[in-house]
Amino acid sequence: MEKQNILLVDDDADLLKVMSEVITTLGYGAILASNGQEAVLQFEKHIPNLVFMDVKMPILDGFDAFFRIRSKFPNANIIMMTGFADHARWKEVKSSLRHLFIRKTMAY
């Protein structure tokens, strides 16, 4: 059986590292990207089984990356994560019912 890969996309390098460690500990392959543009390129190169993608990132945000990936790969499994609310953009993504949106929170 081929190892399943998960694309992790976040501009927070520390969070990306922790997520990668968790994913690999669970037996999945981790593919990393630090912005939406890298996410699109990595998705096209590796066709991962699942994507965890931050929304607010430099160069290309998660919303734009989501729509670029979905235009070429309509069955892509994408979970969006954010600590910020952009209700208008979220409604665009929400119209695609196969996708999940996770709100990130910080514990102090």
Image (cartoon, helix red, strand yellow):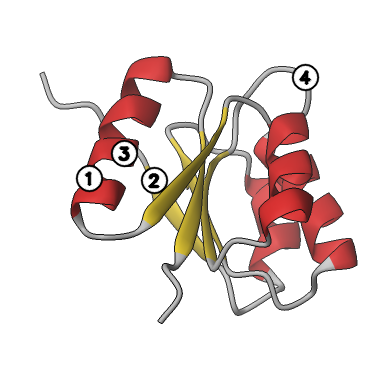
Please state, as top left, top right, bottom left or bottom right, where the N terminus lies in the image. Answer: bottom left
The amino acid at mark 1 is Val
Q: Which residue is mark 4?
A: 59
Q: Does label 1 or label 4 sit earlier along the sequence?
A: 1
Q: Which SS class for mark 4? A: loop
Q: Which SS class for mark 2? A: strand
Q: Which residue is mark 3?
A: 19
Nearer to us in this view, 107 or 47: 47
Observer able to see residue 80: no
Alpha carbon separation for disc pair 4 and 3: 21 Å
Q: Nearer the viewer, mark 1 or mark 2?
A: 1
Q: Which label belongs to residue 22?
A: 1
For residue 2, which quarter of the picture?
Answer: bottom left
For residue 21, which quarter of the picture?
Answer: top left
Q: Are marks 1 and 2 in contact (CB under 8 Å)?
A: no
Where is residue 7 drawn, in percent x and y? 53, 49
Residues packed near mark 1 inside 10 Å, few (<14), some (14 to 19) or many (20 plus): few
The amino acid at mark 3 is Met
